Image (cartoon, rainbow, N blue to C red):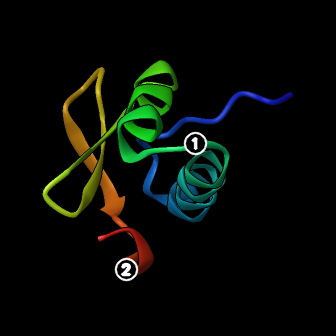
């Protein structure tokens, strides 16, 4: 496994893929958000945000809005 800087805008596609993968693993939206918090990510207001710096990473894919 490699380390990914989620706050780097160049990694937005990989972060979206990670969010998508976690959603397919989770049974509910609540579980999905809990799993994302474990990765240091939150979903708020249609954006994917980094918990540590409270910065927007990218827009949430439309299938999850």
Q: Are marks 1 and 2 in contact (CB under 8 Å)?
A: no
Extreme-bottom residue of the structure: 62
Q: Is residue 35 above or below residue 8?
A: above
* Residue positioned 35% across, 65% down in the render: 60
Indicate the position of residue 17 as horizontal and vertical percent values: 63, 60
Give the side of residue 57 with respect to residue 4, left or right.
Answer: left
Mark number displayed over residue 62: 2
Q: Is residue 52 above or below residue 23?
A: above
Q: Residue at x 21, y 64 (%)?
A: 46
The residue to which callout 1 is attached is 26
Q: CA distance from mark 1 to mark 2?
A: 18 Å
Question: What residue do we see at 49% from left, 40% from top?
Answer: 6
Indicate the quadrant containing the N terminus: top left, top right, bottom left or bottom right: top right
Quarter of the figure with the C terminus: bottom left
Residue found farthest to the front: 27
Query: Residue 54, how many percent across, how many down?
Result: 19, 32
SS at badge 1: loop
Q: In this rendering, would 3 be left or right of 50?
A: right
- Residue 11: quarter of image: bottom right
Relative height, residue 7 to residue 2 (above, below): below
Q: Residue 36 or 16: which is nearer the viewer? A: 36
Relative height, residue 18 to residue 5 (above, below): below
Residue shown at the point (35%, 36%) measured from the top left: 30
Instruction: Give the residue at the far right of this rendering.
Output: 1
17 sits to left or right of 64: right
- Which residue occupies the foreground of this view, 39 or 6? 39
Name the residue at the left extreme: 45
Residue 9 lies, in percent from the top left, at 43, 57
Instruction: Name the image quarter holding residue 26.
Output: top right
Number of residues whose C-alpha sits closer than 10 Å to that of mark 1, classed few (under 14), some (14–19) or many (20 or more): some
User: Mark 2, residues whose alpha carbon is within 10 Å: few (<14), some, or many (≥20)?
Assistant: few
Q: Nearer the viewer, mark 1 or mark 2?
A: 1
């Amino acid at each position: 496994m490699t380390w990914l800087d989620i706050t780097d805008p160049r990694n937005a596609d990989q972060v979206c893929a990670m969010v998508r993968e976690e959603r397919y693993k989770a049974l509910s939206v609540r579980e999905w958000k809990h799993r994302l918090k474990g990765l240091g990510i939150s979903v708020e207001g249609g954006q994917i945000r980094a918990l540590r710096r409270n910065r927007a990473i990218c827009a949430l894919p439309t299938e999850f809005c």
